[in-house]
């Protein structure tokens, strides 16, 4: 059944139902393997099978569904080792917010999550960043091949300066915006965006070489001088000259990446208002994830994300320090 926010609410009336819902998405109804020792032996199930609340040591009722490994006897739940590990936020809230982030084109504002789910501003902010962390693709990613469109832009900055001068090259003019380079595969629709120190040929080339196989890639860009030099190392390079009114040449063009940039900027201006430089990488992960999976239904996108939450953790201190990309 195709998921929407209404039928999700009906499927998870209690916390125990939310655990079961995640178990189904993550483990597909089979017995989980132990996240501590990897054992795939059968597990004892500590919570009641029908999902009813069980008594904790202190006598209060808990709806957490906990498993115990037959081999190492350690306990775990569907949240263990994921971005939801150790959370104090209700699991139902996680499921709702994950779905909202998977199904909304422009993302979800922290203030909206705070108001809707009665969370503190810090908790709402952290919840969203933990989900974004799960959206980041695992390393190492394979190299893109075939037709790849590349371009760079400037995003973020103080809203006060938003309509001001936007330099196209590094070092010219003053800006508080951050340069971002994006690659879009025209074969699969996958998008990879990176914060770059500047838009010098060297920086752009480094991102391209980390993400593409030049011998098997048809690079498509605008006429920026940097790309002319970089393109020489590629199997094929087609560029379009926007200043000459040219947008497509022999079926090649930069439309895909420009559409991505306009969506990204619309969202940052309209939904988030301000995104600081140090957190931008995580917003890019969110936009890349949604854009890369735009051919999938909201349901499959959510399943994909739940599959990725395993093995990801983001401690509060890490999220405050910004991130890698
Ligand atoms: Zn174990």
Image (cartoon, grey):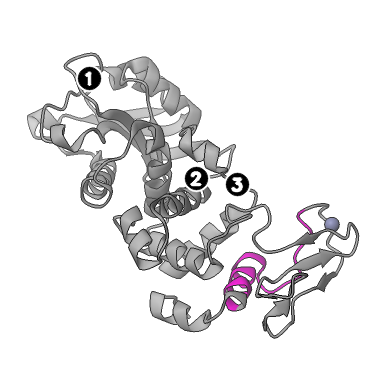
SS at mark 2 in the image: loop
Indicate the secondary structure of the residue bearing disc 3. Answer: loop
Mark sitting earlier along the chain (1/3): 1
Q: What's the CA distance linking mark 1 and mark 3? A: 36 Å
Where are the magenta residues, as a range? Answer: 17-35
- Which residue is the site of mark 2? 136
Taking the spot 91% from the left edge, 60% from the top edge, the residue there is 71
Q: Which residue is painted at 8% across and 34% down in the image?
A: 245
Q: Which residue is mark 3?
A: 313
C-alpha distance separating marks 3 and 2: 12 Å
Task: Residue 62: give x, y in percent of width and height.
Answer: 67, 74
Q: Quadrant of ligand 1?
A: bottom right
For the point 26% across and 36% down, the residue is: 156
Disc 1: which residue: 169
Looking at the image, residue 110 lies above or below residue 138: below
Q: Residues within 10 Å of mark 2 (few under 14, many from 20)?
A: many
Element class at badge 1: loop
User: What number is the disc on residue 30?
Assistant: none
For residue 63, above or below residue 132 = below
Which residue sits at x=26%, y=35%?
A: 155
Residue 275: image location, x then y, percent:
31, 39
Q: Give 208 or 114, whichever is nearer the viewer.
A: 114
Residue 187 visible from this viewpoint? no
**Mark sitting earlier along the chain (3/2):** 2
What crowding class fits label 3: few (fewer than 14 Cα within 10 Å), some (14-19), or many (20 or more)? Answer: some
């Amino acid at each position: 059944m195709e998921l929407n926010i209404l039928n999700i609410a009906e499927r998870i009336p209690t916390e125990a139902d939310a655990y079961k819902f995640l178990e189904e998405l993550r483990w597909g109804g089979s017995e989980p393997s132990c996240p501590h020792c990897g054992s795939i032996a059968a597990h004892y199930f500590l919570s009641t099978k029908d999902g009813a609340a069980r008594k904790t040591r202190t006598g209060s009722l808990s709806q957490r569904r906990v498993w115990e490994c037959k081999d190492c006897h350690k306990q775990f739940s569907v949240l263990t080792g994921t971005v939801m590990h150790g959370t104090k936020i209700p699991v139902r809230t996680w499921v709702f917010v994950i779905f909202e982030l998977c199904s909304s084109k422009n993302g979800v504002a922290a203030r909206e999550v705070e108001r809707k789910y009665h969370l503190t501003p810090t908790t709402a902010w952290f919840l969203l960043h933990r989900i974004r962390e799960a959206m980041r693709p695992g390393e190492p990613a394979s190299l893109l091949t075939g037709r790849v469109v590349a371009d760079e832009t400037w995003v973020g900055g103080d809203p006060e300066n938003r309509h001001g001068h936007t330099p196209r090259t590094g070092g010219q003019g003053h800006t508080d915006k951050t340069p971002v380079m994006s690659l879009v595969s025209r074969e699969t629709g996958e998008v990879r965006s990176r914060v770059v120190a500047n838009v010098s040929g060297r920086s752009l080339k480094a991102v391209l070489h980390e993400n593409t196989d030049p011998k098997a890639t048809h690079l498509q860009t605008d006429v920026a001088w940097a790309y002319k030099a970089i393109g020489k190392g590629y199997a094929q390079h087609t560029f379009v000259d926007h200043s000459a009114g040219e947008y497509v040449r022999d079926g090649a063009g930069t439309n895909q990446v420009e559409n991505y940039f306009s969506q990204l900027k619309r969202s940052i201006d309209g939904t988030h208002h301000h995104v600081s430089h140090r957190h931008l990488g995580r917003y890019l992960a969110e936009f890349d994830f949604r854009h890369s999976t735009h051919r999938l239904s909201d349901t499959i996108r959510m399943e994909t994300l739940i599959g990725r939450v395993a093995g990801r953790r983001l401690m509060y201190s890490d999220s405050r320090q910004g991130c890698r990309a």
